[in-house]
Every structure is written in C-alpha cells, then in structure tokens.
Image (spheres, grey):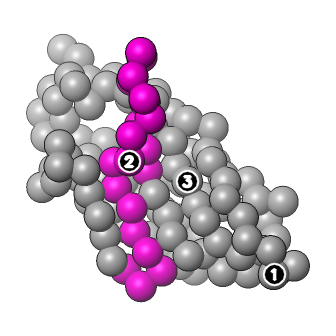
C-alpha cells in the first residue's frame, strides 16, 4: 500500500558529497517520521538520521555535522545530504517512513536500499 523509491547512491571519492532521496507513494494519509539507516557488510543496521513531522531531527554521532536530513511534506520525500564523506560511510542506505494510511491504519515501510561506496 506504500511504496518507497530511493535514489542518489553511487561511488564517490573521500571528501565528496552525495544526496539521497526517498519518495513515498500510495494510500498515505499522513507521515509521522522519516529516517535513514545504513548497513555495512557484517554489521547491524544502524540509524543514521531521522526527522519528525514537526521538523525535529536526530543524528548518529558519527555523522553529526556532516549529514543533513530534510523533508518535503508536499512530495512525501525525505532527503539525506551527505558531505565530507569517509570510507567508513560505505554502506547500503535504507529509508524508513512511519505514518498513517487513508484507512487510518499505521504503516511502517522500508525502501529497497541504495549502495553508497566511498573510495578513491
């Protein structure tokens, strides 16, 4: 009932920048919160950044000051601007959106994941 489409991954050199996007579509009535997670090979998925419907943000300590999460409510889209990228930022990045359907049921959906590789 809710589809998430991610874009913006790829290969970037250390110190470079990339912006990820995640657009939600479907029977969405409202969105409570949107977030980005990442999972490197052999590691657990971890929260990178999150933003609430009111605009409050939360960041992992390892990305604070380098990454910025934002949202476009009209487009049901969340962005993750990543600057000063490091090799340790290499991961598959997933977006997650929590909200309410037009049926008034809550939903919790994940994107398909997009690979980001930071390497020279």
Which one is earlier in the sequence, the residue at label 1 or at label 3? 3
Quarter of the image that includes the C terminus: top left
- Horizontal placement of 14 versus 48: left or right? left
The residue furthest front is 44
Position of 7 with respect to 116 (left or right) is right
Foreground of the two, 76 or 54: 54
Task: Say if mark 1 contacts mark 3, CB within 8 Å.
Answer: no
Going from N to C along the chain, the mark reached first, 1 or 2, is: 2
Going 73% across and 71% down the picture, which residue do you hit?
106
Which residue is located at x 29 percent, y 64 percent?
58
Question: Within 10 angstroms of label 2, few (less than 14), some, or many (20 or more) residues?
Answer: some
The answer to which of 12 and 62 lies nearer the viewer is 62
Inter-mark Cα distance, 1 to 2: 27 Å
Mark 3, secondary structure of its residue: strand
The residue wearing badge 1 is: 104
Residue 66 part of the magenta-drawn span: no
Residue 38 in which image quadrant: top left
Q: Which residue is mark 2?
A: 47
**Residue 66 position in % (x across, y down):** 16, 50
Q: Residue at x 60, y 65 (%)?
A: 98
Reply above or below: 18 against 23.
Answer: above
| Residue 100 image point, x, y percent | 71, 75
Which residue is drawn at the image coordinates 33% and 77% (left, top)?
56
* The label number, if any, that marks residue 55 in the structure image: none
Distance Cα–Cα, label 1 vs label 3? 19 Å
Q: Find disc 3 in the rendering and name its residue.
A: 96
State which quarter of the image contains the N terminus. bottom right
């Amino acid at each position: 009932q809710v589809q998430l489409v991610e874009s913006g991954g790829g290969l970037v050199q250390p110190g470079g920048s990339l912006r990820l996007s995640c657009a939600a579509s479907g029977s969405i009535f409202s969105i409570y919160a949107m977030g980005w997670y990442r999972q490197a090979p052999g590691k657990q998925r971890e929260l990178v950044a999150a933003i609430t419907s009111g605009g409050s943000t939360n960041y992992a300590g390892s990305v604070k000051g380098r990454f910025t999460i934002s949202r476009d409510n009209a487009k049901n889209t969340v962005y993750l601007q990543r600057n000063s990228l490091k090799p340790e930022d290499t991961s598959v990045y997933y977006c997650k959106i929590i909200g309410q359907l037009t049926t008034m049921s809550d939903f919790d959906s994940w994107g398909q994941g997009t690979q980001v590789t930071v390497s020279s």
